[in-house]
Amino acid sequence: MNQHSPQYNKQFWNERYDSEEYLYGEKPNGFLVESLEFLKGKKKILCLSEGEGRNSVFLASHGFEVTAVDLSSVARDKALALAKKNGVSIDYQVTDLSDFDFGKERWDAIVSIFGHLPSELRKKIHQSIRTGLKKEGVFLLEGYTPEQLDLGTGGPKNLDMLYVKEDLESDFSGFSILVSEVLNRDIHEGSGHTGESSVIQFIVKKP
Ligand SMILES: C[S@@+](CC[C@H](N)C(=O)[O-])C[C@H]1O[C@@H](n2cnc3c(N)ncnc32)[C@H](O)[C@@H]1O
């Protein structure tokens, strides 16, 4: 069943990605790069809402076995081209997250970088992440907060799709919180993310 936002649906993303340029750049997200230590010793990583592949290619080039999921086939083609250019391989599945089977205790880590979903679907996906992670598995996220609506430097213009720290912490109750911080930071990632931004950086570990 599709529960994605009618505003930010498959057609929206396919059109947005339909150019030579990598909308969010070819370089990995800065928070992911600086958090690599939290993924030490992990093997199988799932990247949610992966887009054009910059983060999964980065992880694959650090030796991780990466599966990426996104609803855009245009993004998949660009991600596979980026992987080839970097001499790595990734498994990229074009699927709506509402249809994706996370399995049970299957992933060492799950990564979501600016993966914004309507709250109803987001809650369901957080449950699937809880189940899909192995024991001691790590969930790492960076996303925009409601304050981002006033800054206008990226992200959905829809309050329901933005991350509130308390809600995230409650969705992962029982997990160890390794990082949970709301901050303003200057982000320059392609032409899609440009300037001062309000984000939450969040890393938790399954008991
Ligand atoms: C802001 S982009 C982030 C892309 C990538 N994580 C990055 O940081 O470069 C959001 C991505 O979420 C994907 N997306 C949105 N809703 C989705 C859904 N219901 N299932 C799977 N992917 C979805 C879009 O196709 C898009 O690639």
Image (cartoon, rainbow, N blue to C red):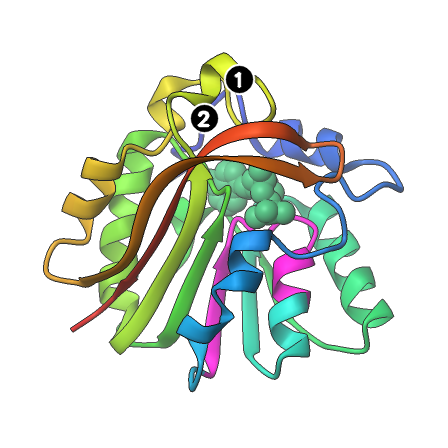
Q: Position of residue 61 (x, y in %)?
A: 68, 77
Q: Residue at x 64, y 27 (%)?
A: 12
Q: Residue furthest right?
A: 20
Dot 1 or dot 2: first in sequence order is: 2
Q: Depth check: give the residue in front, 112 or 119.
A: 112
Q: SS at mark 2?
A: loop
Q: Residue at x 72, y 30 (%)?
A: 16
Residue 50 in magenta stretch = yes
In screen coordinates, is 91 left or right of 83? left
Q: Position of residue 34 (x, y in %)?
A: 53, 62
- Pointer 2 residue: 5
Q: Position of residue 8 (x, y in %)?
A: 54, 26
Residue 192 in magenta stretch = no
Instruction: State the quadrant of the N terminus.
Output: top left
Q: Is residue 102 visible?
A: no
Q: What crowding class fits label 2: few (fewer than 14 Cα within 10 Å), some (14-19), or many (20 or more)?
A: some
Q: Residue at x 47, y 64 (%)?
A: 35
Measured Cα–Cα span from mark 1 to mark 2: 22 Å
Q: Is residue 157 visible?
A: yes
Task: Please state which amino acid type lies under the numbered disc 1.
Answer: Leu
In screen coordinates, is 17 left or right of 177? right
Tag 1 and tag 2, C-beta contact below 8 Å? no
Up-down relation of residue 152 to residue 27 (above or below) = above
Q: Nearer the viewer, mark 1 or mark 2?
A: 1
Up-down relation of residue 188 to residue 137 (above or below) = above
Q: Which residues are magenta?
A: 43-57
- Pointer 1 residue: 151
Respond yes or no on whether mark 2 lies under 8 Å from ligand 1: yes
Instruction: State the quadrant of the C terminus.
Output: bottom left
